[in-house]
Image (cartoon, helix red, strand yellow):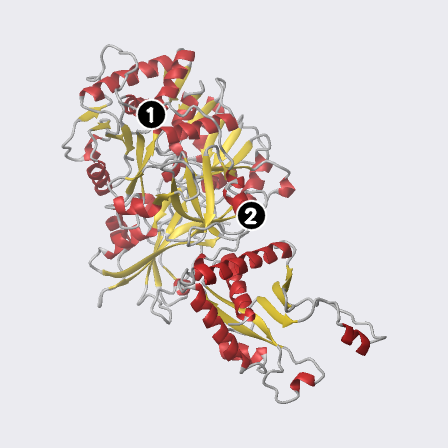
Amino acid sequence: MSAASLFHLAWARVLSVTSGQDRVVFGTVLLGRLSAGQGADRALGMFINTLPLRVDLDARGSRAAVKDTHARLSALLGHEHASLALAQRCSGVAAPLPLFSAMLNYRHGSDGVPSQAVQQAWQGIETLHSEERTNYPLSLNVDDLGQGFRLTAMTLARIGAERICGYMQQALLALVENLETAPQRPLREVPILPPQERQHLLQGFNATAVDYPLEQTLHGLFEAQVRRSPEATAVQAGEQQLSYGELNRRANQLAGHLLQLGVGPDSRVAICVERGVEMVVGLLAILKAGGAYVPIDPGYPAERIAYMLDDSAPLAVLAQGATRALLGELARPLVDLDQLAWSGPAPGNPQVEGLTPGHLAYVIYTSGSTGQPKGAMNEHRAVVNRLLWMQAQYRLGTEDAVLQKTPFSFDVSVWEFFWPLFTGARLVMARPDGHKDPAYLRQVIREQGISTLHFVPSMLDVFLAQGEGAEDLGLRQVMCSGEALPGSLVRRFKQQLPQVALHNLYGPTEAAVDVTAWDCSGPLADTPDHTPIGKPIANTCIYLLDAQMQPVPLGVVGELYIGGVQVARGYLNREQLSAERFLKDPFSKEPGARLYRTGDLGRYQADGTIEYLGRNDDQVKIRGLRIELGEIQARLTQLEEVKEAVVLAREDVPGDQRLVAYYTTVAGQPALAVEQLRRALLEHLPEFMVPALFVHLAALPLSANGKLARKELPARGWRRPRCASTRPRWATPKSPWRGCGPNCSMSSGWGVTIISLNWVGTHCWRSA
């Protein structure tokens, strides 16, 4: 084994970690004299040549990897006179693409101090040294000095040559240690981060500890506010409103009834009601009885509702007259919130024996890749931490009003409900489906004096599109989450609502709503094109890790793992999935600390701010709604006529992301009618999970290795349809369809027929 082999392997490991690839290719400089015949070592001239070297960093041990690298280098010597152009032609890589973008030059040299004999022989001659730059963005020169080595890195300024040399030195030390003490240790586990940088990434960026009073419950926060302002208005829905004292009394009455039904700590109680005062009463009552609420959207299809009821096995179900029929036959107690059978003398606040902040507050179902949704179980202390941080950061007072417009089956609704109710602010309930109507939202913001509300970025785009120039709506702050927030949208927001603060939040349902935050304020010209998701909030940690759950270097893409108090308990009745996603926290000293593996990708900026970069699986978010594409695909392939199906989230028009389903039919079957496909899916899936486009193909395109070639699926050839309408932009038509209608048919230009154009939403574009 040569030292050169060790350095080449260490360099490959550095490139692997910084690129996230297990197979790397880089250029290595060959002397060009070793196979040139006798006397080549004394010939004058430049003979060096650069050729590509491929190194696989897999599960092999360090000793085997060093031997393999040595063998590859030895084999490469037989081609040391082959040109790089010849190597490019033989590689099969298209000419515009380089074979490699990093290089290693291992060379034998001296320490720069000539020997006495050399000084005498070269007397009167001055020796000059220089380091020439290469055409590659990342290169490393290794000088073998005999008694030591010198590293010289040349990189782009933003990467930093000193960092690269530090990674190389750490990789070398780890490799040597492995060869001596653990030669079978997998090469992919060799660390490259110096201890100081590793500590900075794991601890420095996660110094978020705040001494919040977390030993309290969600409803306990509300009860404390009732004592402070019993006569103040707590909740308002249309003409109906309740003071804090009245809301507390009604919730106590219902809680007493639930206690009689056997509800207690960790009991689950389903609630299926329309947005209104009764919804708030029901949620508080469930919590006061010690239970965890399971929100069921009345707009869900009957089969999905039935599955959620069966899976959550609630002790009781809260409903209204308008939603009772959606629940089918129930084998559990039903409480009709429109009836007063449960009302009676107003008791005091229930004291539920054994209830702690470690018990469940709610179970919210999210889309599941197996074809069925999964319920994320969140505890009181997690939500309490989230709300206490939000109050410390953004401050609500008695003069504030918060608009509750998010469907309560999505976790953003949690802070919309409970943040105002423990700070003395007024909770204003939007009318059912009002969150889809920007004109209505503008009206209610002005009439109700709303100071704080939430938008998913796509709906904020629609909301701003209806405005004209700078305006004063009376808003104080807007929270955004659920989707990536484009910088162009932030700039429009600043221009139209210059007095309003905009905050970008990030977090999954499995971690109590939000875990990072970014303040979008600042000069318009300094607004980044890609809005960061910010830094971890109080008592939470964000780790960006590689496939071996080791921290990636600063600026390198890694998967987001969430730690801290807000991590959910797991998925209800999904032990295997919980074990895959909720892991032991190897970086925490807290007993029982866990991580949630998000599947989201991101990277750290120099100050610890995180940039969101998308997903590593088939989960997407459209208009803030979390969707597992596998669930839609599973439902499509259950149709007898459908042979194969794949669903993608496409954004062929900027800002217009939509679901597209590609499918094939069994032999002899034609393309299915759009209404047949829609009806079949709507029996199992909510409206927002039904694709906007259905594309029938003769066969799904496959790559050479037999895998689906997603990039070959037709992406162009259709345009966004525009209605021949004289309505103002974003006027709401009577039809729930956006666009020209449900049965548009057009040629795609790809030899396929697009048989469906269903634009999700309730708006129509004005023709140009």
Front position in the image: 202 or 146: 146
Residue 541: % across, % down? 46, 39
Residue 205: % across, % down? 53, 40
Front position in the image: 126 or 498: 126
* Residue linked to disc 1: 276
Residue 298 visible somewhere in the drawing: yes
Query: In the figure, 602 relative to 49: above or below?
Result: above
Residue 727 visible somewhere in the drawing: no
In this picture, residue 629 sits left or right of residue 190:
left
Measure the C-alpha gap from mark 1 to mark 2: 51 Å
Quadrant of the rendered image containing residue 410: top left
Judge depth for marks 1 and 2 and give the one in front. Answer: 2
Residue in the image at 28% along x and 45% along y: 685
Q: Amino acid at mark 2?
A: Glu
* Residue linked to disc 2: 197
Query: In the figure, 202 relative to 225: above or below?
Result: below
Element under label 2?
Answer: helix
Q: Amino acid at mark 1?
A: Gly
In this picture, residue 126 sits left or right of residue 66:
right
